[in-house]
């Protein structure tokens, strides 16, 4: 897969299943790109909601996107440790507009001690019905949620103790 060049800045664009733009993060710095993975970082970047509202992220974040898994992971560096926000989503794609994925509402919030909360299950059920998610998609998303939670329990990938810190150090070299 072709992706953004390491050291370049790109946008992250989240869509809904019906193709409607959901949210845009500006100025994600690409720290690493392989055939299947993009690791990016941002700090105090503008986020534009579908209704036009704009807000600014509060802390540095390391973003992990995979072209084969149906989730993405954001590690946020806060005073009390690394907090993760995980979106159950389509695998990312990349084009001249940026990194893109479909957000399927189900989210996992992971705390520094690796405990977690499942979020937005009601929103998922509502959108599944409204947008007519096929049964096969629901099965894929449930399976991917299991993979993601296994990664949390095993402290795999972005959940490994040093992952976010190492990529944040790399991010600082670009500033």
Image (tube, rainbow, N blue to C red):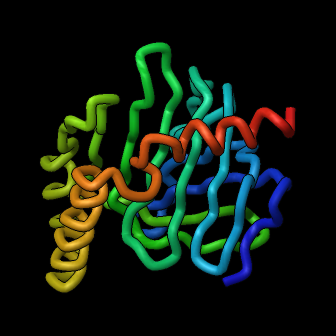
Placement of 23 over or under 61, stated as above or below: below
Q: Nearer the viewer, residue 172 or 96?
A: 172
The residue at the point 85 percent across, 54 percent down is 7
Quadrant housing residue 27:
top right
User: At which x and y percent is residue 96?
Assistant: 78, 69
Q: Quadrant of the N terminus?
A: bottom right
Along the horizontal axis of the image, is 27 left or right of 92?
Answer: right
Along the horizontal axis of the image, is 114 left or right of 165?
Answer: left
The residue at the point 71 percent across, 60 percent down is 32
Q: Nearer the viewer, residue 29 or 17?
A: 29
Q: Is residue 3 visible?
A: yes
User: At which x and y percent is residue 124?
Assistant: 20, 55
- Most distant residue in the top direction: 79
Q: Nearer the viewer, residue 86 or 52?
A: 86
Along the horizontal axis of the image, is 80 left or right of 34?
Answer: left
Q: Is residue 55 visible?
A: no
Q: Nearer the viewer, residue 173 or 9?
A: 173
User: At which x and y percent is residue 125?
Assistant: 14, 58
């Amino acid at each position: 897969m072709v992706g953004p060049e390491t050291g370049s800045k790109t946008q992250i664009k989240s869509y809904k299943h019906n193709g409607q733009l959901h949210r845009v993060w500006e100025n994600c710095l690409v720290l690493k790109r392989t055939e299947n993975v993009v690791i990016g970082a941002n700090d105090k970047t503008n986020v534009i909601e579908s209704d036009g509202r704009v807000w600014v992220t509060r802390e540095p974040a390391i973003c992990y996107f995979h072209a084969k898994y149906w989730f993405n992971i954001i590690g946020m560096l806060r005073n009390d440790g690394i907090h993760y926000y995980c979106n159950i989503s389509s695998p990312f794609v990349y084009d001249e507009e940026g990194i893109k994925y479909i957000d399927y509402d189900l989210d996992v919030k992971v705390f520094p001690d690796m405990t977690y909360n499942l979020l937005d299950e009601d929103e998922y059920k509502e959108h599944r019905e409204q947008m007519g998610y096929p049964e096969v998609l629901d099965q894929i998303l449930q399976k991917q949620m299991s993979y993601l939670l296994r990664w949390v329990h095993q402290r795999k990938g972005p959940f490994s103790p040093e992952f976010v810190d190492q990529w944040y150090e790399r991010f600082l070299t670009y500033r």
